[in-house]
Amino acid sequence: MVILFLVLGFILLIGGAELLVRGASKLASRAGISSLVVGLTVVSLGTSAPELAVGLDSGFRGQTDLLIGNVIGSNIFNVLFILGVSALVTPLVVNHKLIRLDVPLMIGCSLLLGALGWDGTIHRWEALLLVLLLICYTMFLLYQSRKEGLNNDIGKDSVPKAESGNLGIFKSDHWIFDLFFMVTGLFLLVMGANWLVDSAVQIAQNFGVSELIIGLTIISVGTSLPEVATSIMAGLKGERDIAVGNVVGSNIFNILGIVGITGIIIPQSIGMSPAILGFDLPVMTAVAIACLPIFFTGHIIVRWEGMVFLGYYLAYLLYLILDARGHDLLPIFNNVMLGFVLPITFLTLIIVAYREFKQKEESKLQL
């Protein structure tokens, strides 16, 4: 029965997120918001809703290791696995606005979370700061989108003229159905999160696995399934701005929104264990930083870069398994990763980024 409720919880989370994203994205498109901003805001907020539901549920139960493990594990999974698989399916074009603003902001949020949690606790005032930053970021994106829409007639071809204004949402005959999808999706998310957390905690207790490991693996992968489906389908349909923007926006929301909102609402502060501060949080930050040179090289995530991302996620999972079991191979694995694989990868990225920079400089000189 525990496994059954675990599976049902996943299904409800995915189904609820799908309905929420479907309704919210259609409402946003009717309002004339660009596809990149839809990916960074509406879609990323919707696909991160499972993480928020699980975070609130586990936070009220006092299981903050599960809460923070889910956030960090989801961010690592989003970049390494989702972008890796999506790039293997089809090379992803990266919008220059992501490189200028959103990716540096994702890196900054990762560093900020480490700074706030360095004393082992995310206090309520620190959570409030994260939420305020999220509000400012979202308002800025919406302002920029509306400004570009007025200047460049964004959405003119895809959104009917009567629906492109602020009141256009309510002139549509179908907005009520979109709103119904959003409400239904939210209800399913809450129910699915409750079943998922209950089942995961019971499994962890039965097998002697820590809540942190469960949050970093099973829960983070399960709650990130909407991002997997959204990014892959968006890439196949040619909506590559949504595919990449969804991942970057979700990671920003996971830190600012999930940690912030749960930190304000739940009665206790969010604890940051030494294991999180010593390994998992630095890994999440390093993964965010690694995006910058990869996104910079030609503004395209090519297949070999996707394979690198995917390979590192599998290596991260292997480390968690070896560490949980206290396996004798763990020191050897650490030495190989730290002494050979990581340096070679970063050296390759630096060389590729330098060549790209030189080619751009030579092109400017020729012009």
Image (spheres, rainbow, N blue to C red):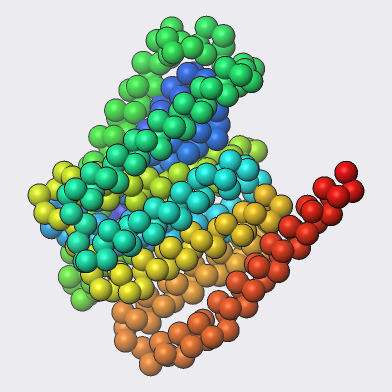
Residue 227 visible? no
Q: Residue at x 22, y 66 (%)?
A: 119
**Up/down of 331 relative to 50, above or below:** below
Q: Position of residue 153 (x, y in %)?
A: 62, 17
Asked if residue 131 lies left or right of residue 244, the reply is left
Residue situated furthest front in the rendering: 365
Asked if residue 23 lies left or right of residue 207, the reply is right
Q: Position of residue 129 (x, y in %)?
A: 27, 45
Nearest the camera: 120 or 229? 120
Q: Residue at x 58, y 78 (%)?
A: 343
**Up/down of 352 relative to 261, above or below:** below
Asked if residue 339 lies left or right of residue 304, the reply is left
Q: Position of residue 282 (x, y in %)?
A: 40, 68
Nearest the camera: 315 or 97? 97
**Up/down of 58 relative to 226, above or below:** below
Q: Residue at x 26, y 62 (%)?
A: 117
Residue situated furthest right in the rendering: 366
Residue 185 in which image quadrant: top left
Q: Position of residue 22 (x, y in %)?
A: 44, 30
Q: Residue at x 39, y 57 (%)?
A: 110
Asked if residue 360 lies left or right of residue 92, the reply is right
Residue situated furthest left in the rendering: 267
Tag count: 0
Nearest the camera: 179 or 6? 179
Residue 106 visible? yes
| Quarter of the N terminus within the rendering | bottom left
